[in-house]
Image: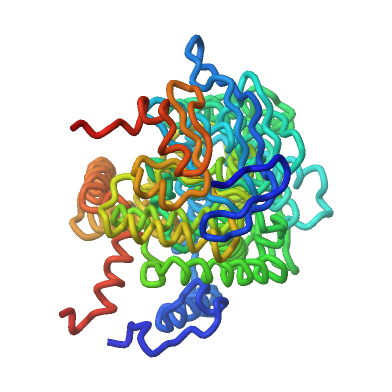
């Protein structure tokens, strides 16, 4: 009834180009942001932070990153786990080598290092496309994991081969290490999510985003109208890996606290993030959030339902849970191949006409 | 009959002043392996004129257009643009020189809206850097709005206001052709190359498209080179016509000259049987 653009006139191109052109959307967005910043940190507890909110926020950053590459620029990548490992090991080396520097700068620098690695592994994309490129990025995944396993310098020669995140503070609050409170961990992840979503939105709505989408939709035509495929593809790899690296750094330093590369950043991670992007919706920032939420929250929800609700044994519930999640992924892809973002858009289009659709 | 002089312009039948040579193709030869698609062809395109390339299927017309737009690099011959010899270039570098084109089978970006498609046409007009665009502050936003204004002028001109936010994949064929023309126009090209702009259209759509081509030439003074099979359209629209057959040039001149050229009649136009 109130979800309309009618009567809400845009008198400048600036207004017309804004992210949420419909008033109700805009208010909803501000409301969610306000709740996330001002309410959630005061009510958060350890369970909510570690089971749902932190993984959701961190995977949202990774999905935004991968969505830029796969959804906007059309370059398939299976190397996400490896790039997250680059972010994690970079932040670890930076934190241990320069303890006096703020961890925020470390995380951003880890993103930059991952971006450079991503650009290097993106070079094959200039020659090969589609499935063949996916296989080339798979090589990145295996090579990077092997590298962090075999070269002791990366894990500071620790006996276990693990990396452990030392305690660091931001404005006096511990955000990493065992003393960090759930609220502090949550807020630092939230800050990076807001930053990532904002930058990603700006890049994708402007000329850089159009270049990426042009390359995705028809690379030859893009080149004829003046897109340099080299810079477009490599910038997509760079920006994508930047966010994926930040996600990897946060996953290790803030969420896990300690990590072993094959376990934490294996090929499973690559597939998990790719599924988030596909289920959420290719080429949509909202879809990245929706996909991350779906794959993070659904298993937790099912576990609570099966074990807590029906009183099933945990091992049985764990297996059933995998089967249900798998079945639901297939179900959603059949019902809406363009992901949750498209589903959401259809709902909104219906809502605009409600309650008088004719 | 118009006599074309070396470096001065000429006046067309309808009284338009045509300027000097913008693009000069000299002895272009293009081979694909052993096949010679273009054999020693020379012709020029002058400022402000509508230049047509016609010929039977497989004559090498599209290859010629691809040479001009930098997509193919000819094995022999020289391409002179605005008095300078053009070296081998990547297609996106040619686009930056101010040569825009449309395609025989539409090459729009299906996943993007009409507006975004046309905005891509202006990407060479954008100078804001990566970080400015990332924070969407100052220059990036100002440029976006300035370019949007230009694009809106073209949208008005081609009468596609009502579809500007529609994804291109949903549009019918005739409108897609028009959007593609809009995208090429958005680049404010020196030379606009149209590869069969009227292929597959009905009479009404052809009339619309012809009117747009004439209007573009008239209003923006854009030099246009086009390939087209509909002889009625070609003879009406163009100022000068190049006729190709089997990779050779068999005729060059005003529509009237070409129409009466015996070789052209034999190869392409044909004669009415009594």
The extreme left residue here reads: A358
A283 over B231 or under it: above or below: below
Q: Is residue B201 visible?
A: yes
Report which quarter residue B185 is drawn in. bottom right
Picture residue at 22% right of the left edge, 81% below the top: A354
Picture residue at 41% right of the left edge, 46% below the top: B234
Q: What colour-coding does the image apply?
A: rainbow
* Side of A336 relative to A121 (left or right): left
The extreme bottom residue here reads: A7
Q: Is residue A215 visible?
A: no
Across and down, in percent, residue B56 comes to: 37, 29
Across and down, in percent, residue A335 comes to: 21, 52
**Foreground: A238 or A128?**
A128
B35 over B25 or under it: above or below: above
Picture residue at 64% right of the left edge, 19% below the top: B76
Across and down, in percent, residue B153 comes to: 53, 71
The extreme top residue here reads: B34
* Side of A272 relative to A214 (left or right): left
Across and down, in percent, residue A99 comes to: 81, 50
Tally of numbered discs: 0
B206 over B264 or under it: above or below: below
- Specify the quadrant that holds the C terminus of chain A: bottom left
A248 over A49 or under it: above or below: above
**Foreground: A261 or B256?**
B256
**Foreground: B117 or A245?**
B117
* Side of A315 relative to A284 (left or right): left
- Specify the quadrant that holds the N terminus of chain A: bottom left
Picture residue at 72% right of the left edge, 64% below the top: A170
């Amino acid at each position: 009834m109130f979800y309309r653009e009618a009567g809400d006139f845009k008198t400048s191109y600036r207004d017309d180009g804004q992210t949420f052109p419909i008033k109700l959307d805009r208010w909803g967005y501000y409301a969610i942001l306000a709740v996330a910043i001002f309410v959630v940190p005061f009510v958060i507890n350890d369970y909510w932070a570690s089971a749902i909110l932190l993984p959701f926020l961190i995977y949202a950053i990774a999905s935004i990153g991968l969505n830029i590459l796969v959804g906007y620029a059309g370059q398939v990548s299976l190397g996400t786990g490896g790039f997250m490992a680059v972010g994690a090991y970079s932040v670890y080396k930076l934190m241990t080598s320069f303890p006096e520097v703020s961890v925020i700068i470390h995380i951003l620098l880890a993103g930059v290092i991952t971006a450079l690695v991503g650009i290097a592994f993106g070079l094959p994309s200039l020659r090969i496309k589609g499935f063949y490129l996916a296989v080339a990025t798979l090589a990145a995944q295996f090579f990077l994991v092997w590298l962090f396993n075999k070269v002791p310098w990366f894990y500071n020669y620790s006996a276990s081969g693990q990396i452990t995140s030392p305690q660091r503070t931001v404005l006096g609050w511990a955000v990493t290490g065992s003393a960090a409170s759930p609220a502090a961990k949550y807020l630092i992840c939230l800050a990076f999510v807001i930053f990532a979503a904002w930058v990603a939105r700006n890049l994708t709505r402007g000329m850089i985003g159009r270049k990426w989408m042009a390359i995705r939709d028809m690379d030859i035509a893009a080149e004829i109208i003046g897109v340099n495929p080299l810079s477009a593809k490599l910038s997509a790899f760079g920006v994508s890996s930047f966010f994926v690296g930040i996600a990897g750094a946060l996953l290790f330093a803030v969420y896990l606290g300690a990590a072993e590369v094959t376990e934490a950043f294996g090929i499973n991670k690559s597939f998990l993030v790719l599924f988030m992007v596909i289920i959420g919706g290719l080429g949509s920032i909202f879809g990245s959030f929706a996909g991350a939420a779906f794959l993070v929250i659904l298993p937790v929800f099912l576990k609570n339902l099966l074990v807590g609700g029906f009183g099933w044994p945990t091992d049985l519930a764990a297996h059933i849970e995998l089967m249900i999640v798998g079945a639901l992924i297939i179900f959603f892809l059949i019902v809406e191949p363009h992901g949750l973002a498209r589903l959401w858009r259809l709902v909104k289009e219906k809502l605009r006409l409600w309650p008088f659709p004719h | 009959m118009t006599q074309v002089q070396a470096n001065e312009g000429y006046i067309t039948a309808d009284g338009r002043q045509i300027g000097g040579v913008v693009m000069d193709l000299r002895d272009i030869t293009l081979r694909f392996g052993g096949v010679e698609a273009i054999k020693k062809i020379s012709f020029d395109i002058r400022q402000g004129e509508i230049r047509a390339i016609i010929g039977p299927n497989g004559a090498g017309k599209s290859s010629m257009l691809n040479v001009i737009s930098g997509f193919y690099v000819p094995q022999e011959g020289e391409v002179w643009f605005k008095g300078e010899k053009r070296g081998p270039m990547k297609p996106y570098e040619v686009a930056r020189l101010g040569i825009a084109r449309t395609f025989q089978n539409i090459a729009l970006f299906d996943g993007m809206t009409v507006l975004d498609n046309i905005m891509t046409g202006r990407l060479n007009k954008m100078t804001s850097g990566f970080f400015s665009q990332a924070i969407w502050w100052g220059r990036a936003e100002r440029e976006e709005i300035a370019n949007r204004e230009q694009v809106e002028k073209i949208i008005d001109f081609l009468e596609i206001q009502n579809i500007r936010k529609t994804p291109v994949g949903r549009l019918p064929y005739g409108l897609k052709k028009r959007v593609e023309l809009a995208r090429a126009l958005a680049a404010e090209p020196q030379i606009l190359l149209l590869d069969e702009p009227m292929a597959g259209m009905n009479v009404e759509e052809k009339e619309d498209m012809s009117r747009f081509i004439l209007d573009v030439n008239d209003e923006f003074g854009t030099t246009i080179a086009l390939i087209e099979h509909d002889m009625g359209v070609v003879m009406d629209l163009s100022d000068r016509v190049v006729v190709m057959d089997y990779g050779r040039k068999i005729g060059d001149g005003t529509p009237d000259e070409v129409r009466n050229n015996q070789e052209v009649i034999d190869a392409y136009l044909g004669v009415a049987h009594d």
